[in-house]
Amino acid sequence: MASDNTSIFRDDLLRGQVGLITGGGSGIGLGISELLASLGMHVVIASRKPEHFDTARDRILAAGGSVSSVALDVRDVERVRAVVDDVSNTHGRLDLLVNNAAGNFYAPSATLSPNAWKAVVEIDLYGTFHCSQAVYPVMKAQGGGRIVSASMTLHYRGWPQMAHATAAKAGVDALTRTLAVEWAPERIRVNAIAPGPIPTEGVRKAFTPPADSGIPDRFAAADARMDAYAQERIPLGRWGTPADIAQMVAYLASPAGDWITGSIFVVDGGEWLARQ
Ligand code: COA
């Protein structure tokens, strides 16, 4: 079953707005950056890997979008603050933060090293907090803003060998609800999106279980097998795409999202409900 990801939004919907997208140069983050830029937003792509910048920037510029890029590891709180200061000084505002940067891999909990636990929890959870806290004064001063964080669905039931990531994303859900209530007086809307399986290169790398783990491989290498998996296991019968997630981000960034805060939107074709 094909996906129809034609944008439903008008071209200038987000014109005049500025968005900071962590991990916005590849995979789902790139899809988010591209859609937001196509709707008129100036997109600042923050990435640990500068090699992602050029391709992302070229694609967005070629499509007529406005984009800049900055090197950022969301674990580095001082650097996070410096980047947010720089964006707000350069553009005079910051309307949207997308906490998309994540680091995940399969590893047995019994032997997960302290540093491996720390690496994932610091990127997924601490990074989301550092970035959200850094944008707070800017958004407060300008009378409001939007924060959208990447969550997941694997912690709704349990997912072997993902203790670090599931714990971190459960924390992101809690943070989303708490910040939503705490920062509502400043008109900062805080929401999250829990994507289902979207086989980008990075996601496939992070979520391919070791061959001897006994964990079902949702991204089995053969594409024919992948199609069969989608048809058997995903109620809506297809894999997700970065555009599926990007459209939800655009909705939340738009005036349609004015009365939405503290929500976690599952965008997964029904996968987690049907998971065996
Ligand atoms: N299995 C077990 N442990 C792993 C691992 C794996 N696949 N990958 C990393 N680790 C451990 C390392 O061994 C290290 O622990 P140690 O010092 O005890 O050996 C610790 O995690 C940190 O690894 P390192 O590579 O130094 O950290 P990093 O900060 O450069 O990167 C990640 C950590 C998680 C971001 C890295 O796995 C990564 O770059 N992943 C790709 C991006 C990604 O996951 N995207 C998510 C898409 S959903």
Image: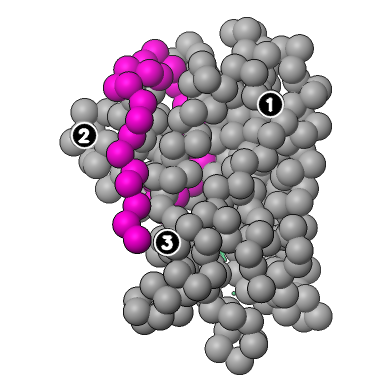
Q: In the rendered structure, find residue 236 and report the number of the disc placed on it.
A: none
**Disc 1 beta carbon < 8 A from ligand 1?**
no
Question: Which quadrant holds the N terminus?
Answer: bottom left
In which image quadrant can residue 154 be found?
bottom right
Q: Considering the numbered disc 1 on the image, is that residue within a helix, a strand or a loop? A: loop
Question: Left or right: where does residue 169 sit relative to residue 25?
Answer: right
Q: Quadrant of the C terminus?
A: bottom right
Amino acid beneath label 1: Thr
Instruction: Say which of 98 and 264 sits in front.
Output: 264
- Horizontal and vertical percent position of residue 263: 69, 34
Closer to the camera: disc 2 or disc 3? 3
* Residue lying at 44% horizontally and 37% vertically, measured from the top left: 247
Identify whether 196 is placed above or below 183: below
Image quadrant of ligand 1 equals bottom right
Residues under labels 1 and 2: Cα distance? 31 Å
Q: Residue under label 2, please give it.
A: 63
Tag 1 residue: 261
Please identify the dominant SS of the magenta region.
Answer: loop
Read off the magenta span: 1-30
Farthest bottom residue? 212
Amino acid type indicated by mark 2: Ala
